[in-house]
Amino acid sequence: MTMLVLGASIGQAQYYGYRGGFNLANLGADAENNSFRPGFHIGAYYQVTFSDKILFEPELQLSLQGSNSDDDTIDQSITMLNIPLLAKYLVNDELSINAGPYLGLIMGAEAKSDADDFDNKDLFNALDYGLGLGASYELPSGINLSVRYLLGLADISDDESGTETVIVDNFPIEVEVEKQRITNQVIQFSVGYLINK
């Protein structure tokens, strides 16, 4: 049985390549007063051909994400290590659409203001996950252009619900504080090269 699986894997066409490009990232769910933050991503991918139309393309990617504030007070930078695990469907020899899950690890986070920058990685959970959806156009030379949307489903905020003290009519009172849910969102525009095709 093991030999049959190994033989099937060897029989499939396998390629690898590199990809990088421009990000437009934001934070969703309960995040407020924020807008898209420009950034970049760079990574490598591995492509396995299962049939004339279906491919599997895992990728390892360093991605600079986060969000900018609408009032230019504090911008949030998040450094991600993303692992998209996408299936690709070939519409024709050049055009493909792709979809699948992704995993992400928050490698670093920094709040940026005019006055100072400070590390706030401890405000975020380390693990992210979600769905990826996109399309690619590949030239005969192996150069490919792609656009992708990564929709975060995990709550990356480490904020816990509880209480806080506020002053009302000069008296301190305890009020309930709801947990704020925050998710990653990023649109990626990429240029890649499939090396050994």
Image: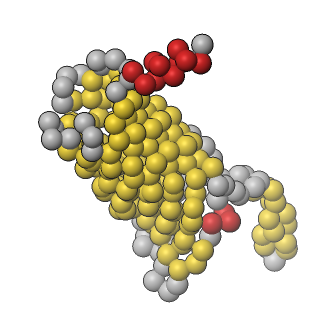
The residue that appears at 47% across and 19% down in the rendered structure is 7
Name the residue at the front extreme: 3
Figure disc tally:
0
Quarter of the image with the N terminus is top right
How is this picture coloured? Answer: secondary structure
Quarter of the image with the C terminus is top left
Q: Is residue 133 visible?
A: no
Q: Residue at x 19, y 22 (%)?
A: 92
132 and 4: which is toward the camera: 4
Residue found at the far left of this picture: 140
Point out residue 16 in the picture as x, y percentages from the top left corner: 35, 41
Taking 89 as reference, is 176 left or right? right
Up-down relation of residue 50 to residue 107 (above or below)? above
Observer-nearest of 147 and 47: 47
- Taking 104 as reference, is 64 above or below it? below
Report x, y in % for residue 107: 57, 61
Q: Quadrant of residue 159?
A: bottom right
Q: Position of residue 98 (x, y in %)?
A: 36, 30
Q: Is residue 108 left or right of residue 98?
A: right
Residue 158: image location, x then y, percent: 69, 56
Between residue 33 and residue 160, name the one nearer to us. Answer: 160
124 sits left or right of 59 in the view:
right
Q: Residue at x 44, y 43 (%)?
A: 59
Res. 141 visible in picture:
yes
**Residue at position x 34%, y 27% in the image:** 13
